Image (tube, rainbow, N blue to C red):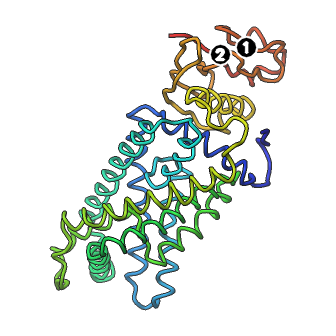
Amino acid sequence: MKHEVFGFDAYSPAEIAERVQKVCVIKAHMPLLTMWMLAVLAGAFIGLGALFFTLVISDHSLGFANSRVLGGVCFSLGLILVVVAGAELFTGNNLLVMAWAEGCLTTRDVLRDWTIVGAGNFVGAAGLAVIVYLSGYGALNNGEVARTAVQIAMAKCALPFWEAFFRGVLCNVLVCMAVWMAMAGRSVIDKAVAIIFPVSAFVAAGFEHSIANMYFIPLGMLLRESLTVPVPGAEIISGIGLARNLVPVILGNLMGGSVLVALVYYVIYRRGRPGSTLPAGSCREAALSSFCGDFLRTGPLGLRAFFFKAGGPSNGGKIRRVTAGRRRIVRSRPDCPAPSGTGRPASGRRAFSASRDLRPGTRRRAWRCGWRRD
C-alpha cells in the first residue's frame, strides 16, 4: 500500500491499521533504557494532565457538568504530550495485540513491553505526585485543590472490584480510539483534535485510567495529612487501597484496549489479508523497510530518530540501530530503496553516499542506507 508523505487528507482506517501494526513492531523492540525512559516520561505526562484536571474541578462554582467536561478537556493534555512529544504509555501500548495477532510479535515481546512500560509509567506518575506535593500545589484555592485531590483518591480506593473493572474497560476503549485516530492525522493539530474528544469523554464520565490512578492515589496519600480540616474516611487511601484499585483497573484497561479495539480492528482490516500472519522476523523487516523508505522521502525533519534492536535478515545479520542524519541507517534487507538521483540501488554491504553516487545538485538528499552483518 502506497502512502502520500505530504498531503492534507487523513489516512484511511485500513491505512491506520497498517501503520499501527508497523509502529507496534518498532515499539516492542526498543532497547531497555530507551523504553524505560519513554515510559517514565509518559507517566509524568499523564500526571500533568491529572494535575490540570484537579485544578479545574476544585472550583465548585462551575457546576457538575461544566467542571467535568472542562476538566476532561484539560486532562487531554496528558495524552497529547504522549503522542506528540513521544512517550510509551501502557494503556496505548495495548494496541500491540494487533501486531501479536498478525504474528509479528511473540507473547514474550508483548509481555516484556507491558511490564517495562507499566513499571516506568508508575515511577513517572508517582514521582510527579511527590514533586507536586513538595511544590505546595495543594494550597491553591485556599486549600480546596488539596481537598479535591484527597476526595478523588478516596473515591477511587472505595470502588468495588467489578465496577472498577468495567470502568477500566470503557476508559481504555476511548483511550485506544484516541491513539488510533491520532494515527490518522498528518499534523499536530490533527492529532490534538483526534485526542481531545475521546479523552474528555472518559474523564467526564468518571471512567478509570490505571496510569492516571498511579498519580491520583499517591498524591492523595501525601496530601491527606496536610489538610487543616481532615476529610472523613481518608484513611482508606493507602497502599492497599492503591493495589485494590489498580488490579481491576489494569485488567479492565487490558480488556478494553487489547480485545475491544486492537483485536476487533485486526479482524476487520488485517485478518486474511496478503502478508498477514508472517513470521516475526519478516514483519520486523517490513516495518523497518517502510521506515527507511519514508525517511528517504522526508529527511530528518519528517521522522524522528529511533534507536532499537530487532531480528535481522535470513543471512544472520542483526539490526543495530536506525538514526537520522548522515549516519548509517542499518538495514535488515539488501534491497533498501535509493533516493532519487542515484544511478543504482544499494545492495549487499554497499551503501550509497553523496560524494560518489548522487548526481550534481542532489547532495542534500544523501541519506545512507545499507546493511551489515555482525
Q: Residue 127 lies in what quarter of the image?
A: bottom left
Q: Which mark is residue 157?
A: none
Q: Is residue 367 left or right of residue 160?
A: right
Residue at 57% in and 33% down:
305
In the foreground, 167 or 202: 167
Residue at 64% in and 55% down:
188
Q: Is residue 343 left or right of residue 169?
A: right
Determine the residue located farthest toward the front in the rendered image: 272
Disc 2 target residue: 370
Disc 1 target residue: 346
Residue 148 image position (x, y, % from top left): 31, 80
Q: Which amino acid does the dot numbered 2 rest on? A: Gly
Above/below status of 270 relative to 368: below
What secondary structure is marked by label 1?
Answer: loop
Q: Which amino acid does the dot numbered 1 rest on? A: Ala
Above/below status of 206 relative to 244: below
Quadrant (top left, top right, bottom left, bottom right) of the N terminus: top right
Pointer 1 with pointer 2, Cβ within 8 A: yes
Sequence-first disc among 1 and 2: 1
Residue 249 image position (x, y, % from top left): 37, 64
Mark 1 crowd level (few <14, some 14–19, many ≥20, 10 Å Cα) = many
Report whether residue 71 is seen. yes
Q: Is residue 53 left or right of residue 265?
A: left
What secondary structure is marked by label 2?
Answer: strand
